[in-house]
């Protein structure tokens, strides 16, 4: 499993990469967070795109963390819900999306769910697979979508910086046309690159020299 994770603050970023299970990667991620001072911090946040393995990683390694669902993934699911209720490209869907997106931005997921349920009840909308799936999605993640509260605390609500890190740190170096790698060769390139771009190259080189 190929992953790159961003750890740090707005002014400080470190990177980890690996070819391993999510469980093993979670252990290394926790070690990096502790090295970065998690044990002394007042608050820890874990931002994810909604994948079940990320929340399991959080449960095992960061039980005290504030879990945040990436806002833009949440908005994609909101679009799916609206289209399931009102059809794709309809004026009614546009009106619902405009109103409900404001609620999502404010983290008013309960209000959004109540409005969706009223649409189902009032219009007799058939609870198709899409509607059922998306209603369950918002129910399950409501605590991770308190976006107004998270913004007030100064926490990230979007995972764009993570995805950008995957592209610039990993993809830009290792996914060029015609490239083929062995696992050992890939890690021999990417681990120093992560250290270099995360401002840890000198420490990494010193530890390597001592081995």
Image (tube, helix red, strand yellow):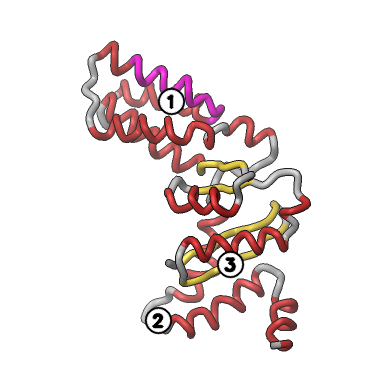
Residue 140 position, x and y percent, is 43, 34
Residue 11 belongs to magenta span: no
What's the CA distance linking mark 2 and mark 3? Answer: 21 Å
Location of the C terminus by quadrant is bottom right
Q: Residues within 10 Å of mark 1 (few under 14, many from 20)?
A: few
In the picture, which quadrant includes the N terminus? bottom left
Which badge, 2 or 3, comes first in the chain's sequence?
3
User: Which of labels 2 and 3 is toward the front?
Assistant: 3
Q: Residue furthest top?
A: 122
Q: Which residues are magenta?
A: 105-118
The numbered dot on residue 65 is: none
Q: Which residue is mark 2?
A: 179
Q: Mark 1 or 2, which is nearer the eye? A: 2
Question: Cβ–Cβ below 8 Å for labels 2 and 3?
Answer: no
N-terminal of the two: label 1 or label 2?
1
Q: CA distance from mark 1 to mark 3?
A: 38 Å
The reply to whether callout 1 and callout 3 are in contact (CB within 8 Å) is: no
Label 2: few (<14), some (14–19) or many (≥20) C-alpha neighbours in 10 Å:
few
Label 3 sits on residue: 16
Mark number displayed over residue 98: 1
Q: Give the answer, above or below, for where 162 lies relative to 43.
A: below
């Amino acid at each position: 499993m190929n992953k790159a994770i961003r750890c740090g603050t707005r002014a400080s970023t470190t990177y980890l990469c690996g070819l391993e299970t999510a469980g093993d990667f979670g252990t290394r991620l926790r070690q990096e967070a502790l090295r970065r001072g998690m044990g002394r911090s007042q608050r820890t946040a874990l931002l994810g795109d909604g994948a079940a393995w990320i929340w399991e990683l959080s449960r095992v390694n960061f039980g005290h963390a504030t879990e945040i669902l990436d806002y833009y993934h949440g908005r994609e699911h909101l679009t799916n819900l609206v289209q399931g209720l009102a059809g794709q490209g309809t004026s009614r869907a546009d009106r619902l999306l405009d109103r409900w997106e404001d609620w999502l931005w404010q983290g008013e997921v309960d209000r959004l769910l109540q409005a969706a349920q009223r649409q189902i009840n009032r219009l007799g909308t058939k609870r198709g697979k899409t509607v059922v799936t998306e209603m369950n999605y918002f129910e399950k993640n409501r605590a991770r979508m308190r976006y107004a509260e998270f913004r007030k605390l100064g926490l990230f609500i979007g995972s764009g910086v993570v995805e950008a890190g995957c592209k610039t740190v990993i993809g830009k170096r290792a996914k060029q046309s015609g490239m083929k790698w062995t696992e050992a060769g890939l890690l021999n390139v990417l681990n120093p690159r992560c250290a270099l771009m995360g401002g840890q190259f000198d420490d990494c080189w010193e530890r390597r020299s001592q081995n």
